[in-house]
Amino acid sequence: MDPTLLKNVALEWLSNDPSPECRSLIQSLLTTAESSGDYSALSAMFSSRITFGTAGLRSKMFPGPSNINDLIIIQTAQGLITYLKSYHGRLEGKLGGQLGGQLGPAIIGYDHRKNPELNISSKRFGQITKAVFTHHSIPTILLDGYVPTPLVPFAVKELGGCCGVMVTASHNPKDDNGYKLYWSDGCQITEPHDSGIQSSIMQPENLKPQRSYDIDLVSTDVDSTSQLLSSYYLKIKEGMSSNIYSSLTSKHGPSFVKSSSPKFVYTSMHGVGSPYVTRVFSSYGLPSFMAVPSQNDPDPEFRTVGFPNPEEKGALDMAVKHADENGGDVILANDPDADRLAVAEKDRESGEWTVFKGDQIGVMLGRWMWERRGR
């Protein structure tokens, strides 16, 4: 991009960016570029723009339209609302007003990712989204605390929501963040919604903040989150057996279960999963798992794994070591936003570990569902 054009694009962005930290960095890069004649850093930030697709948005937490930051989230939320209102209005017309004219609530969740130097975080993106939706009089629930991604689409269906947003970059490296969108059916968006939302984002009125959003006044919804979590675990139990551990005990006796049941090791890959998996185990009356201590708590630095995807080679090394040292038989591993599962099993005779592939896990779960529920 021509340096003069690049400078003008950067200045236009500066005039709209609400983040003092991002504005300061951009201004510093502009000054450096003008004195040195090297516009490469600015070019990387302003020569392209991340686009909204079926996976939502995902990019580095950094200033400019090539990355994900406060202004990108404002533009995205404003564009999303434009599209929601337009789509809802068309659907209302087709159904002859049966929807009652009111959009259902928007559900927003977030994980623990952040860039403290630029005051960028998943929680802040969630607060911005709620502020924009509230400004447009759309009821919004900002889930309290770090939540697993599956809770957002569950809440959308449970509450008849218009959409769900989960702020996470899933298993991407630590510098990235993302913005996953779920439609009113609880599924991630498909065509033509993704292209329609992208077009709405790019409308001139949505590229500028429509007001000064006071993020510090945006609170999470503690009671709604607690109620949703209770409903979430209840639905899981209703959909499966009521108490697996108790049924095994009654069938074979407590001594058999104690001696024969596998000992589980769990890692959240520095993500949000541990308290939720703990509650799942408790809900089914299962013995507690052994957590990998160095990976159990949410850590935006992902200090022990460069790429926190449990399916990547070497990602389970610390879990295997912990299991070998503590008599573990089965490893369960989530990715940081707890919507991906890896499983490994130890042969009690040979001591060798088998790490199952995703399709193998699917076959095992499918067979279990067929035997327990499908006949």
Image: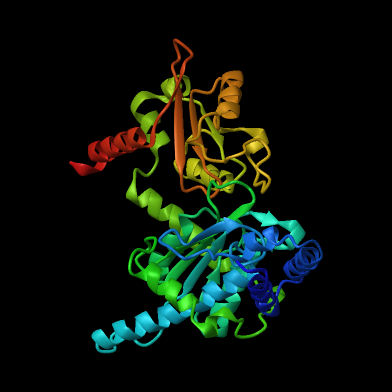
In the image shown, does 375 or 120 lie closer to the viewer?
A: 120
Residue 285 % position (x, y): 47, 39
Residue 157 % position (x, y): 38, 65
Left or right of 56 on screen, residue 70: right
Residue drawn at (43%, 16%) of the image: 347
Q: Which part of the image, by quadrant, shows the N terminus?
A: bottom right
Left or right of 216 on screen, residue 101: left
Residue drawn at (33%, 38%) of the image: 362
Residue 211 % position (x, y): 63, 85
Quadrant of residue 45 within the rendered picture:
bottom right
Q: Is residue 238 above or below residue 9?
A: above
Quadrant of residue 16 within the rendered picture:
bottom right
Residue 314 % position (x, y): 55, 29
Q: Is residue 72 above or below residue 335?
A: below
Residue drawn at (56%, 81%) of the image: 134
Q: Is residue 314 above or below residue 223?
A: above
Q: Which part of the image, by quadrant, shows the C terminus?
A: top left
